[in-house]
Amino acid sequence: MRLRVPFSDVDMHGNVHNGRYVAYAEDAINEFIRESGLSDQFDPASSRLAYHVKKVEIVYERPLGFGELADITARAARVGRTSLTFEVLVHPAEPAGAPPAVRAQVVWVCVDPETRVPSPVPESTAAALLLASRAGTPT
């Protein structure tokens, strides 16, 4: 997904506030799921499962500033028995091929929505996520 950094996302130094990258990561993951045609598998009403964030790790390589264009991509990096690990990269759009400004890893745990007890990730969901990640579905 492409984003032009809005003024509301920057701190007093003109850089994207570090906390905003969590929202960017979540948006990119949800776009990846939607663009991969997997939204129904993550809808608690149709799948009878929910996914809760367990961990977010962000590594800052360089700041992005107000008005900069950023390309944000997400993919499933790992599928565990009850968890999904997504890798998110935030690249400045220019110059083309620039290294990521930010790297994020987001871990979701699959749970029963009523008991909130971890549940196995359905095999069909795991396979579809890994296939979409290998296909390089853009976000």
Image: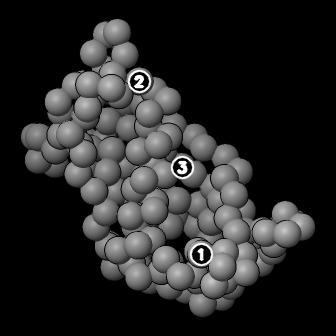
Specify the farthest residue to the front: 45
User: Counting other residues with Cα less than 10 Å from the Cα at mark 2, is it few (<14), some (14-19), or many (20 or more)?
Assistant: some
Whichever of callouts 2 and 1 sits on the residue coming sooner in the sequence is 2
How far apart are the alpha carbons under marks 1 and 3?
22 Å
As drawn, 81 above or below 55 = below
How far apart are the alpha carbons under marks 2 and 1?
30 Å
Tell me the residue at 48%/52% (across/down): 26
Secondary structure under the numbered disc 1 in the rendered image: loop
Residue corresponding to mark 2: 17
Pair 1/3: label in front: 1
Q: 48 and 26: which one is in front?
A: 48
- Whole-percent x and y of residue 79? 62, 71
Residue corresponding to mark 1: 43
Q: Amino acid at mark 1?
A: Asp
User: Would residue 88 be seen by someone viewing this image from the given angle?
Assistant: yes
Whichever of callouts 2 and 3 sits on the residue coming sooner in the sequence is 2
Q: Amino acid at mark 3?
A: Gln
Residue corresponding to mark 3: 105
Whichever of callouts 1 and 3 sits on the residue coming sooner in the sequence is 1
Tell me the residue at 65%/59% (across/down): 108
Secondary structure under the numbered disc 3 in the rendered image: strand
Tell me the residue at 71%/51% (across/down): 54
User: Would residue 134 be seen by someone viewing this image from the given angle?
Assistant: no
Res. 17 image quadrant = top left
- Whole-percent x and y of residue 34? 41, 72
Figure quadrant of the N terminus: bottom left
Specify the farthest residue to the left: 95
Tell me the residue at 57%/40% (across/down): 57
- Whole-percent x and y of residue 37? 41, 82
User: Counting other residues with Cα less than 10 Å from the Cα at mark 1, is it few (<14), some (14-19), or many (20 or more)?
Assistant: few
In the displayed structure image, the side of residue 129 where residue 47 appears, left or right:
right
Q: Amino acid at mark 2?
A: His
